[in-house]
Image (cartoon, grey):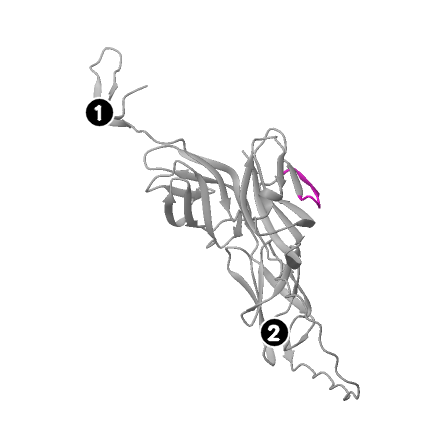
């Protein structure tokens, strides 16, 4: 191995004096450069999606490109993490490259996909009580897992992206009158539908007839349990072609007691064959079987119940990759 630092470059043609360039090449000591993942891995064609690139060996001054186009607002946060904003691009999958100054680029093949911007075509029902809590159905295009829904800025609950064209949720409380519906995919501009629904004053409950019987002494009740919340596990990897086993220790913090899986869904984010997922409700267990002989990434979405919280914790996610 050559010593670190600048060296002399000599070029000699047969029978001629050599051409010499002093300091023409520099040997550097840098960690291996690799790009493991980019999150989110999808964005709209117009660009502007805020992304986080994870890997190793990143250096100050690094340049990020997607499909050969330079990303904007690139910030090297550490040797393993870069934030950036995507450039415009055509529909399809593209490689993500990180190039440190003066050295070849590290590349994640087909790491990012440009997709159509989300649109909203309608919402049912057309009216809602001001108290909210009613089930709603939103139709449109380009909906992605993790999308959020608001009505006049108030967040809906129990949001579930059933497909790229359909979302179900529970409406928030609102004021009397028309409300603006907004759907936002992770890290992307929002889709808006003005006057999507009209809030109407909730009908008062009829007053009960006065009772002539003595009112019984109420029985003390145990305090109600908090709602099971959505969990974000982060990224967990395995070797290419090797099954990834996720147990309750991987999926749940210690504060969640007695968890039980109620639903598991898998979406490949690397294009093509991203493998398959099997799962067991209790004790919780999820097994991802990535394709043999190739890199792959995906997102597992799961719902659960637990002994120390009420309802269902839906929308919980874990990102998996085989590298």
The answer to which image quadrant residue 201 occupies is bottom right
Give whichever of 283, 262 is nearer the camera: 283
Q: Is residue 144 above or below residue 124?
A: above
Give whichever of 295, 217 is nearer the camera: 217
| First in residue order: circle 2 vs circle 1 | 1
Residue plotted at (55% across, 72% down): 152
Work out which quarter of the rendered image holds the C terminus and state it.
top right
- Where in the figure is residue 296, as x and y percent of width and height? 58, 37
Q: Residues within 10 Å of mark 1 (few under 14, many from 20)?
A: few
Residue plotted at (66% across, 41% down): 286
Question: Is residue 283 part of the magenta span, yes or no?
Answer: yes
- Where in the figure is residue 61, as x and y percent of width and height? 32, 42
Distance between mark 2 and mark 1 Cα atoms: 73 Å
Left or right position of 219 against 3: right
Left or right position of 299 against 51: right
Question: Is residue 80 part of the magenta span, yes or no?
Answer: no
User: What numbered label is drawn on residue 252?
Assistant: none
For the magenta stretch, what is the residue range? Answer: 274-284
Q: Residue furthest right?
A: 213
Give the residue pinned by disc 1.
Answer: 21
Asked whether residue 165 is in view, the answer is: no
Residue plotted at (52% across, 51% down): 43
Give whichever of 98, 267 is nearer the camera: 267
Left or right position of 101 against 154: left
Q: Is residue 157 above or below residue 195?
A: above
Q: Is residue 78 above or below residue 218?
A: above
| Foreground disc of the pair 2, 1 | 2
Give the residue pinned by disc 2.
Answer: 173
Q: Residues within 10 Å of mark 2 (few under 14, many from 20)?
A: some
Number of dots carrying numbers: 2
- Where in the figure is residue 278, as x and y percent of width and height? 70, 40
């Amino acid at each position: 191995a050559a010593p670190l630092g600048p060296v002399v470059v000599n070029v000699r043609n047969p029978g001629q004096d050599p051409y010499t360039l002093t300091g023409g090449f520099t040997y550097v000591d840098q960690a291996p450069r690799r790009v493991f993942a980019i999150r989110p891995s999808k964005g709209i064609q117009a660009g502007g999606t805020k992304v986080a690139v994870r890997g190793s060996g990143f250096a100050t001054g690094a340049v990020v490109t997607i499909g050969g186009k330079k990303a904007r607002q690139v910030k090297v946060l550490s040797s393993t993490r870069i934030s950036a904003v995507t450039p415009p691009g055509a529909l399809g999958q593209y490689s993500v490259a990180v190039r440190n100054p003066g050295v070849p680029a590290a590349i994640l093949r087909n790491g990012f996909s440009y997709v159509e911007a989300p649109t909203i075509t309608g919402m049912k029902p057309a009216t809602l009580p001001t108290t909210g809590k009613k089930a709603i159905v939103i139709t449109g295009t380009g909906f992605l897992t993790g999308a959020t829904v608001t009505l006049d800025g108030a967040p809906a609950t129990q949001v579930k992206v059933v497909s790229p064209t359909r979302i179900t949720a529970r409406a928030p409380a609102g004021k009397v009158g028309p409300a603006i519906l907004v759907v936002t995919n992770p890290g992307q501009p929002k889709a808006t539908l003005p006057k999507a629904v009209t809030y109407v004053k909730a009908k008062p409950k009829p007053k009960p007839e006065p009772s002539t019987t003595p009112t019984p002494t109420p029985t003390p009740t145990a305090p109600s349990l908090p709602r099971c919340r959505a969990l974000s596990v982060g990224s967990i990897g395995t070797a290419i072609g090797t099954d990834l086993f996720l147990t309750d220790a991987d999926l749940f913090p210690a504060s969640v007691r007695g968890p039980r899986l109620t639903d598991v869904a898998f979406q490949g984010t690397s294009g093509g064959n991203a493998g398959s997922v099997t799962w067991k409700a209790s004790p919780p267990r999820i097994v991802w079987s990535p394709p043999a002989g190739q890199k792959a990434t995906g997102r597992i979405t799961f719902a659960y119940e637990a002994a120390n919280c009420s309802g269902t914790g839906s929308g919980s996610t874990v990102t998996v990759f085989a590298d």
